[in-house]
């Protein structure tokens, strides 16, 4: 019989912050995997890789230097895990708190997709209001008068006024009472929805869940300034210790919140008798920068370990024997989560032995094609120009005990690392550059990206 499959993504969870979750999962017989690398440093391309088994340059669901974002290519949607599993008789259910994991971005073939897009903003401004804001060009009090009388948008005008006051008068610090608490960003409702689905006892099923608890924002104040973290990087560059400690505190707090929710979810899965006959994969799509490298925050463009090394916890169905060899020279890309799912199904049908070591690879890559939340296209101030310099196409390679990040636009090595701590020779660097360049040829062949130099 086919196993049930749960793919649970804790959005933005760094590998080195995942210990509390591992402590919870041990008791349910999970195994923890090391040396796992995300194919990209943000949600859309990384999820699309898990769903298609392809690197972003091949599935096409990624950003560009010009600030555009594309959905998964139509031509590869037939290999989506939801399509393959549907053809095998699975019912596919999605529960997402992230608006990117929806059919609008090419995530099709769900039998049922539940979106719970939550905002912790106390004074939200909705997209239908944005056109009025654009119409009102004047600054200051005239703006509110116009919104109130000409467009009869009293509520919007008062919200803007309140946001302004909270920001300017530092009344937002009153909200610190709220921000010190754990913030639920949809997990509670999603778990309730999953439980409802499990009660209907349909088998085999594929359940995909995306939890946003660890994703920014970490405070109400950030929400009062839209695009705050990106703007912070643009205006201040790097290194404001106050903001950084705020993010670090918020991040840790939210890891504990999702740990509590994961325990709750596992209890529901257990109560509904889905533990023994299920493959349960718990991972993340990318990490988060919390002030490293001279004060960088957020997850954009870069390919640092804090952004692309991710946790991976797997609970195999009881019926199969899961094997692995201890080999610390090989790596696992999250594009292979696709293969893990399909191989476990195959193992259940045939020899009942699944060996994940065969899925680990000698080298893995990660790709970035620019800043996906690009607020500007051209720079008009020095700060904006400084920010735009982050906007590069980069490829990272992990091979044996080494890592190298290459900037494709200026043909420059941006970072290299030796995990042995023994040093890295010139020959080794040359070898890694060769791997990156070969991978870049694949990127060029796919059409959406052209490498200039
Ligand atoms: Zn994400």
Image (cartoon, rainbow, N blue to C red):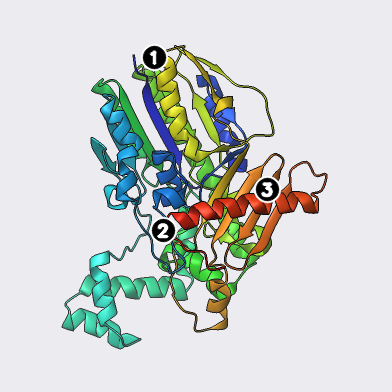
Image marks 2 and 1: residues in contact by CB distance under 8 Å? no
Q: Quadrant of residue 373?
A: bottom left
According to the image, label 2 marks what residue?
Answer: 447
Q: Quadrant of residue 53?
A: top left
| Residue at horizontal 31 percent and vertical 88 percent from the top | 138
- Is residue 248 something one can see in this rendering? no
Closer to us: mark 2 or mark 1?
2
Crowding around mark 2 (Cα neighbors within 10 Å: few <14, some 14 to 19, many 20+) is few
Left or right of 62? Residue 441 is: right
- Element type where label 1 sits in the image: helix
C-alpha span from label 3 to label 2: 27 Å
According to the image, label 1 marks what residue?
Answer: 349
C-alpha span from label 1 to label 3: 38 Å
| Residue at horizontal 47 percent and vertical 51 percent from the top | 215
- Which is more toward the observer, 19 or 152? 19
Residue 63 at x, y = what percent? 43, 60
- Element type where label 3 sits in the image: strand
The C terminus - image quarter: bottom right
Residue 411 at x, y = what percent? 63, 65
Left or right of 244? Residue 229 is: left
- Which is more toward the observer, 117 or 142? 117
Residue 426: mark: none
According to the image, label 3 marks what residue?
Answer: 403
Residue 19 at x, y = what percent? 60, 35
Q: Quadrant of residue 440?
A: bottom right
């Amino acid at each position: 019989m086919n196993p049930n499959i749960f793919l649970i993504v804790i959005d933005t969870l760094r590998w080195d912050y995942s210990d509390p979750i591992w402590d919870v999962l041990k008791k349910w017989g999970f195994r923890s995997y090391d040396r796992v690398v995300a194919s990209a440093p943000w949600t859309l391309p990384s999820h699309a890789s898990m769903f298609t088994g392809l690197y972003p340059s091949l599935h096409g669901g990624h950003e560009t230097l010009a600030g555009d974002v594309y959905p998964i290519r139509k031509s590869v949607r037939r290999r989506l895990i939801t399509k393959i599993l549907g053809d095998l008789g699975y019912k596919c259910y999605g529960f997402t708190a992230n608006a990117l994991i929806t059919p609008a971005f090419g995530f099709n073939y769900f039998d049922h997709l539940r979106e719970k897009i939550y905002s912790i903003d106390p004074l939200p401004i909705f997209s239908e209001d944005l056109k009025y804001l654009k119409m009102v060009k004047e600054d200051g009090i005239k703006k509110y008068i116009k919104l109130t009388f000409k467009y009869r948008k009293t509520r919007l005008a008062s919200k803007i006024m309140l946001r302004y006051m909270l920001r300017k008068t530092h009344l937002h610090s009153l909200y610190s009472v709220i921000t010190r608490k754990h913030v639920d960003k949809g997990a509670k409702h999603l778990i309730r929805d999953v439980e409802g689905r499990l009660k209907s006892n349909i088998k085999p099923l594929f359940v995909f869940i995306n939890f946003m608890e660890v994703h920014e924002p970490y405070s109400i104040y950030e929400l009062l300034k839209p695009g705050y973290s990106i703007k912070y990087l643009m205006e201040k560059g790097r290194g404001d210790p106050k903001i950084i400690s705020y993010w670090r505190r918020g991040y840790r707090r939210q890891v504990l919140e999702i740990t509590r929710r994961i325990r709750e979810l596992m209890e529901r899965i257990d109560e509904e008798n889905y533990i023994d006959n299920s493959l349960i994969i718990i991972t993340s799509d990318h990490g988060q920068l919390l002030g490293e490298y001279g004060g960088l925050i957020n997850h954009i463009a870069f390919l640092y370990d804090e952004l692309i090394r991710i946790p991976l916890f797997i609970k195999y169905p009881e019926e199969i024997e899961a094997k692995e060899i201890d080999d610390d020279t090989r790596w696992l890309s999250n594009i292979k989560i696709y293969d893990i799912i399909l191989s476990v199904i195959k193992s259940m049908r045939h020899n009942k032995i699944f060996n994940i070591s065969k899925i680990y690879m000698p080298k893995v890559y990660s790709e970035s094609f620019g800043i996906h939340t690009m607020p500007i296209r051209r720079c008009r101030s020095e700060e904006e120009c400084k920010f735009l310099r982050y906007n590069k196409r980069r490829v990272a390679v992990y091979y044996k005990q080494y890592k190298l990040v290459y900037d494709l636009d200026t043909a420059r090595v941006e970072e290299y690392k030796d995990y042995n701590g023994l040093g890295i020779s010139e020959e080794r660097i040359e070898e890694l550059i060769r791997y990156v360049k070969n991978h870049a040829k694949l990127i060029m062949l796919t059409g959406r990206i052209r490498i200039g130099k």
